[in-house]
Amino acid sequence: MSSRSRYPFYLALLLLISAGISLAVWRHVELGIPWLTGEQRPVWMVEARIDFDALDEPVLASLNIPESPPGFRILTEQAASPGYGFSIINESGNRRGEWSIRNANGQQTLYFKAQLVPDDTATTRKPKRPPRPASVFWEEPQATAVRETLQQAALRSSTPESMTRELIKLMQSADPDQNTTLLLSESNYIELLTRMLNHANIPARIADGLKLEDARRRQLLKPFLQIFDGEKWLTFHPQTGRQGLPDDVVLWRQNASSLIDVLGGNNSQVSFSILKQTVPALQLAQAESDANSLGLFSLYQLPIEEQSMFRMLLLLPLGALVVAFMRIVIGVRTSGTFMPVLIAVAFVQTTLVPGLIAFISVVSIGLLMRGYLSSLNLLLVSRISALIILVIFITTGLSIVGYQMGFNTGMTVTFFPMVILAWTIERVSILWEEEGAREVVVQGAGSLFVAICAYLVMSAPLSGHLTFNFPELHLVILGVILLLGQYTGYKLTELRRFHPMKVYEG
Amino acid sequence: MSWISPFAMNRMGLLNMNKRNVDYISRYNERSSYPLVDNKLKTKLVAAEYEVKTPRLLQVVRQQHEISHFRERADALGGFAIKPAKGSGGKGILVIIRREGDHYIKASGAAVTVAALERHLSNILAGLYSLGGAPDVAIVENLVESSPSLAKYSFQGVPDIRIVVFQGYPVMAMLRLATKASDGKANLHQGAVGVGLNIANGRSLNSVQFNRPITLHPDTGLSLENIVIENWEHMLHMAAHCYEATGLGYMGVDLVLDAQEGPLLLELNARPGLAIQMANGRGLLPRLRAVEALKRPHFRPEKRVQFVIKEFKDL
């Protein structure tokens, strides 16, 4: 490669690295996958409790349950109710949990639990068809009062929102006129508001909200007024006229006509308990990725067994990076290019000290046996094959002896890849014969040093977390390794190797 | 522990491992030419085409079953060397200087049996000494009898001359002398002595063993300061010709001076080591850059040798 043609290469590297980093940042922002392990996020656990008296006949109880409430995401849902069948049905935007039982008598209690996660981006889905205002019929003298009040509000407003606000102000004014007094004297206030707005050709409905406060029990839903502005439902506080939903209120019921229906029972009541919990941010992100299209590209979709395999596999690039760095920049000599990584992978499974003991003992016993094999004048392939079998004998023997002596760690020796062990023994043996014990010690220590470094990097909880949850960071590792491939500077060990040259300088 | 600062290394123009690999070997050496130098048999054949002499080829053992014939044919041989065709770094080379009854005497004086030789051949064929363990062939060459003028400096083994050839220009040279520590081998990292040679006239410069400067050979006790290589210009020509033969832009050419046949090409190396700089007490980079800076490189090997003799005397 000529020096001119390197610029596109560096540009590509830059792209690669920045693509990796920006993908990771994007997924962190979008999916909320935490950078660090053990990060916690608040979650509201809401429990709806239904009480009713069963009438000794088949019971069907159905509770309206939230569907994409604005500002929240539903993490988990579960029902607890002994003896009852339970299922969630979704009919035209009305999501209901249904309990059923063939026969029940007396006081009954059913529970429904949902974990809600605050999420600013969550919004209610847009209705397929814009709702139409319900037709309302008024009797005199209310009809006149309504007409006049609405006229008054209409005069002071321009849009459905402002109309709603003005109407609420009129109805709530400290100095009510005759019309409002008349209207308020009769019926339920919020129902009245809804009817009046519908009359004014503004689609309106009542939604029930739950105020989320930690460790509250026996809470009831509070009604909110919603109007449709042609695009989406807007929420108003029916008393203050404040537009929008407070952050700590979740709209439990939006689109359903009833909160609870019970067939075969009476005196039904719904009350809510609320608890603030924290869950690991990672778990949250994983649960969320199911729903999110971004999750398609994540590893959480794989079966658990494959996931754990990938956890291991995705650590390997880190090991390769350590080896590349150690050999190119530091200049450590190892026996076999990537033998240290494979040994490090085995260390990850055995933990360091038992792994080191097992590795060194297998290799030393193997070397003793290899000494005999070399005098047999065997062909290389059969010598390696024999060595593999011997290595298996040695590991079996070590496991059994270790177990009998009460060391379970003896068993961990089986994590080492047998073929790698056999080749290591072969290489070390040849190195010994050809270059002497000194070189064996140098390269062996170098290999183990690199393996331990790779192990330390790979076994850090953070690296496991980052490599698995942000697989795109491997692009960065790839970029750094490619960059190392271009390093033409001195190795650290060369500064020592060439030190006698100092006398020639000048 | 003593260290050299990277700035001092830069000032001396010392070529380092990573730079050699990236900027010279991978830039100037075509991958397709590697087999020519990695396989000693091919090297011999291509060298013959370009009239570069190599030690006489006695036998080639290609198959396991041919090993049994080796015993019959070996009877007729005096001294010989068994080499793996694809061996590297002098691995797997077994030198037999003479026979005594049923035993063959190695360069070190140790006796080995025919069975040991056959095992060695078998190992070579199985690929024990070749890169990546690929199956290999064994070549048996006539024993090189070193010219006495050089042989006296070496403890056993044959002294050889390593010349680094860059784009056909011999840029740096050293004489390698075996020692007791190197077990008769001429490899510097095994403890052989490296004597830097003035590229212009073949006179010795500095000497190193295990990277440390020395003035006397550790075993023979001879002063290494006034060695002059005979036939120096001829050797430079041979080295320069190897560029035409292989097309490798950056290589090491290993030559020996045979008592009867004169300079012979022993082997070529596509990844020559860096220790030659320590033996010469100077870095390779100034010379490599001088060659790279040539606007019109010389086509004929003779011209290139003349250029080197003229320009690199003091560089």
Image: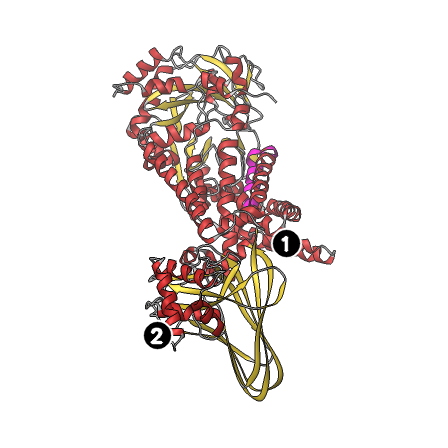
Residue A14, image quadrant: top left
Residues B21 and A492: in front is A492
Q: Principal SS element in the magenta part? A: helix
Residues B107 and A415: in front is A415
Could you say which disc has been placed on residue A412 in the image? 1
Q: Amino acid at mark 1?
A: Thr
Determine the chain carrying the residue at label 1: A
Category of crowding for the residue at label 1, using alpha-carbon neighbours closer than 10 angstroms: few (below 14), some (14–19), many (at least 20): many
Counting from the top left corner in percent of width and height, residue A346 is at: 58, 50
Mark 1: secondary structure: helix
Mark 2: secondary structure: loop
Magenta span includes A431: yes
Magenta span includes A391: no
Q: Is residue B67 visible?
A: no
Counting from the top left corner in percent of width and height, residue B159 is at: 47, 22
The quadrant of the picture occupied by the C terminus of chain B is top left
Q: Amino acid at mark 2?
A: Ser
Residues B80 and B125: in front is B125
Residue on which the image places disc 2? A135
Q: Which residues are magenta?
A: A424-438
Looking at the image, residue B90 lies above or below residue B9: below
Callout 2–callout 1 Cβ contact below 8 Å: no
Colour scheme of the rendered structure:
secondary structure
Determine the chain carrying the residue at label 2: A
Please tell me which residue is depicted at 36% across the width and 19% down the height of the picture: B289
